[in-house]
Amino acid sequence: MNFKSIALLTFSALFVSVLTFSSKTYAQRADSTKKQHTDTTKSLKEISVTAKKAFSIKKMDRVVINVDALISNAGTSALDVLEKSPGVQVDQNGSISLKGKHGVLIYIDDKPTYLATEELQNYLKSLPSSSLEQIEIMSNPPARYDAAGGAGVINIRTKKGTAKGFNGALNLAVNQGKRTRLPNSINFNIRNKKMNYYGILSDNYNNSFTDLDINRTYKNADNSPRSFFNQNSFFDRNGNTLNGKVGADYYQSQKTTWGIVLTGMKRKSTQINNNTSNLFNASKQLDSIITAKNVDKINFINGGINFNYRHQFDSTGHGITADIDYLIYQNQTDQTYYNHSYFAGGNLKSEDILSGNLPSTINIYSIKTDYTLPLANAWKFESGLKTSYITTNNKADYSNTVNQHTKPDYDKSNHFLFQERISAAYLNLSKEMKRLSMQLGLRTENTQSDGHQLGNIMKPDSTFSKSYTSIFPTFYLLYKIDSASKHQVGLNYGRRIERPFYQDLNPFLSPLDKFTYYVGNPFLKPSYIQSVELSYTFKNKYTLTSSYSNDKDAVNETIEITNGTYYSRPANLGRQIVKSLSFNGDMDPFKWLNINLYSELTNIASKSAFYTGTLNTSGTYVYTSANARITFGKGWDGELSGNYRNRMITAQFVLGEIWTTNAAVQKKLSAKSTIKLSLNDLFYSNVRTGIIKNLALTEANWVNKSDTRTAILSFSYRFGKTFTTPPKHENNGADAEKNRVKG
């Protein structure tokens, strides 16, 4: 019996034991309650009733996840919360997929993050889960949302106080694995008759690592081994991130609200990659060794301001909103890569230093307005306009130092300027009837973009311009089969677009080490995705969904090996088809037990012209996750959870199976304070492995480990009153551009 089988059996035994213990505890509480009932004529005590939030709620156009419903979410980050959401997977690079599809746009309070890949991952890691209220998963968003995002939109809603007076919450946590991390936050709200002030402040100290092993076998034309390459990279990351969001609403009247929101993030971090590469000949005899110490010092600053206006003409929902946004992203990365090459016997062959100065700035301007008009017979009409303007300025100055002599590296140095204008308009018509609900939407977007790479001594100038207009229809249908709404059938269809990340269009060469480079692609085209979903829901608790999507010119990472050097670049795949069957259920077998189960069966098929001829891959994987929430009584609650995914084939990559097991317990110290303890990845099984296919005369695989087995102790304290006030404005005019900023 292997370790995995023993671990699963142990988890099952633990699960059954806890349920048995909980059942006995519940029975004892029932007997005690019965005994106390006989004494009610002598005394009357205060009774407190607490309703538990459902983990997930199915709506016509989205699935809503309540973050606080899971104890194990305490003391974690927004990225960890996303990984536990139904259908959402996060790979080793921080790329987020939904039901096997990449290209998910991430929003915060209906405002785009304007970030992707590494910077998005860093941002979500710096956002404490304690500041989150809900996760809205929209695989096919309505026409009100930007058409960008081939896999859909995930909207993260943060907590906002709405009580009169001064109120809020303090959240403190210690996340201890092999390294220590400290995610802390506070949110507050100050409300009087005419004004409402609110904010979220967080400080996240990160201390983490990644241990990456890469193996490559180079072959001759007859498929015999030519040489071997083994590399270990240990990434040591340390840094601090400050996040802030403050806003104010002025209630001019019951119908009119003016608002302003300020957002900001400052991240100062250092990444040190200690890298050892061993090169072997065809007989597996050591030929040479290359060691490197790659140091990246990063200063990232993001600031934004939003002005918003909302007016309700009457109580029927007839109203108009407007947003004006400005955002700026500034990143300064200083790179110093120390390289030493040795002969097999250990004698120094050569040494050099590669230095890089990489400043970048992105400015985003956006104006948006939405109009809502209720019509006769329960119809509702919505329309809106939006325009955005984006400019980026990316510069890379590299120099090489050999034998204490430094000279510019013009092959890697570049200066890239890019600007883009997107204009959009939409119409949406919906109707709510007794049994039938429907929604029809149509959105049109015009895109104009210009790129300019400035030349140097070795490289000439290059420019490109693109202009295109597209139409994006959406359709939703929800039918209640019976009058009690126990049986519901849903159908939705949508067409979306996936625009390239801004930096991916930059035709530059960026080194990760001596054998690995990232290359941009100015010839990237936008991809267009059509998707359809059919669902059946029983008692608003169990949902079975069948989905299909067809992605033309899908943008994906591709790997090319040339003369032993590894080049990663984005490229358009001819066609990618994703078919999925999923189940999401929320069960309450006992009063003290709630179980959420999600499972999906997904097939991904890709076909495209490729470096090595034709890429034609297809693979089916199974992903399942389960969470059991247990009420012990006297303020104690527990949780057991886990997930599993077998081997997954996506385009050029074969990802190895992966599974995790987690446990958590919480104690309510008072009506306002709670302490929680979570144990994540108990068996340290969250190890990422993979194989890269379709390489020219090369086989390659990797093993990636990080600090995933952790214990998290968190404390939360709420203060203030609970009298509700009018809602704050949450929409933002910048709806998709944030997500195309790539770190």
Image (tube, rainbow, N blue to C red):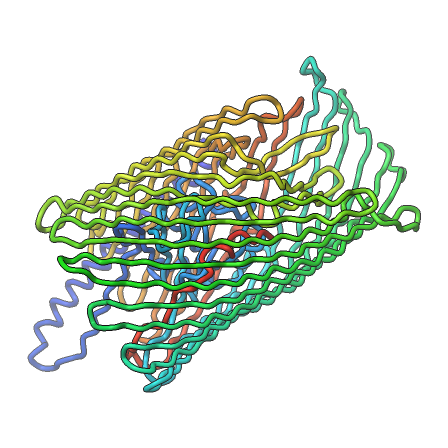
Q: Is residue 200 left or right of residue 267?
A: left
Q: Is residue 543 visible?
A: yes
- Quarter of the rendering containing residue 566: top right
Which residue is located at x 55 percent, y 22 percent? 614
Q: Can residue 679 be seen in this view?
A: no
How many circles with numbers are drawn on the protein? 0
Expressed as whole percent of the image width and height from the top left, the position of residue 286 reads 79, 29
Expressed as whole percent of the image width and height from the top left, the position of residue 706 reads 58, 48
144 or 137, nearer to the observer: 144
- Quarter of the rendering containing residue 72: bottom left
Q: In this view, does 176 lie to the left or right of 230?
A: left
Which residue is located at x 46 percent, y 45 percent? 469
Expressed as whole percent of the image width and height from the top left, the position of residue 150 reads 43, 43
Q: Quadrant of the N terminus?
A: top left
406 up-or-down from 560: above or below: below
319 or 537, nearer to the observer: 319
Q: In this view, does 269 lie to the left or right of 126?
A: right
Which residue is located at x 19 percent, y 42 percent? 489
- Quarter of the rendering containing residue 158: bottom left
727 up-or-down from 376: above or below: below
Which residue is located at x 46 percent, y 68 percent? 324
Q: Is residue 348 left or right of residue 43?
A: right
